Image (cartoon, grey):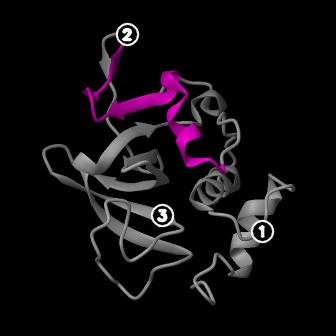
Amino acid sequence: MRETTNRNDHPRIAIYNTTYHPGLAKNSPYCGTSVEWAIKQAGWNSVIEYAPMARNWSLKKDYIVWSRATGPLTRNGRKYTPQRNDVVVFYSSGRWHVGLLEDWQEGNAYCKTVEGNTSDRGVNGIKKPTGREGVYDEKIRNKKDIYCIVRPYWIAMHVNPQ
C-alpha cells in the first residue's frame, strides 16, 4: 500500500486514525495509531494514553525495556531484552516516531522495524529511498537512533514480561 498523494491519504490510514480516536482527522500522521491498531488486532490492550502522539509511547516508564541512555533495563534482577512486536520510539531533532520491532540481535548495531507513516528521509533525515515509503515500510535502523523501546502490552499478558 502507498499513499495516493503523499498526504496520509490511503484508505487504511483513515482506519488507523479513526477506529480508536474518532475525533482525529483521517489524514493525520499515523505512526502511533498504526502501532496501536496492530497491538489491538493481536488481542492486546495498549496502556498508552492517546497513542496518535508518538511521544506518548515513551512516557510509561514502567513499560520501557531498553533506552538510549541505559541500554537494557534490569528489574528485580532480570535483564529485559527487546523482542519482536515491542514498540520502538525514535526521537531526533524535535521529531518523534514509533514503529514495531521486527528483529533485535544483541551485539548488532542495527535492528529491523516495521513502521507506518514512513518517508524516504526517515527519522534521522538521511535519504534512503526504497520505493515503498508511505503506509508501511520495513526499515533497518541504527540502534543509536532509538530513544527507547516499550513493551506496552504487559498488563494484558498477566505474566511477568520476558
Asked if one can make out residue 1 in the rendered structure from this viewpoint, the answer is: no
In the image as oriented, which residue stretches furthest toward the left? 107
Q: Look at mark 1 in the image and give the residue it sits on.
A: 26
Q: Quadrant of residue 107?
A: top left
Left or right, 69 with respect to 119, comes to: left
List x then y, in percent, for residue 62: 50, 21
Amino acid under label 1? Lys
Tally the marks: 3
Expressed as whole percent of the image width and height from the top left, the position of residue 27 reads 72, 71
How far across and how far down the image is residue 44, in percent?
A: 67, 43
The residues tagged by marks 3 and 1 sit, at their Cα atoms, a distance apart of: 18 Å
Residue topped by disc 2? 76
The residue range painted magenta reads: 52-76
| Lower sequence index among marks 2 and 3 | 2
Depth order, front residue of 136/86: 136
| Amino acid type of the residue tagged 3 in the rendering | Glu
**Mark 3 or mark 1, earlier in chain:** 1
Q: Is residue 93 left or right of residue 55?
A: left
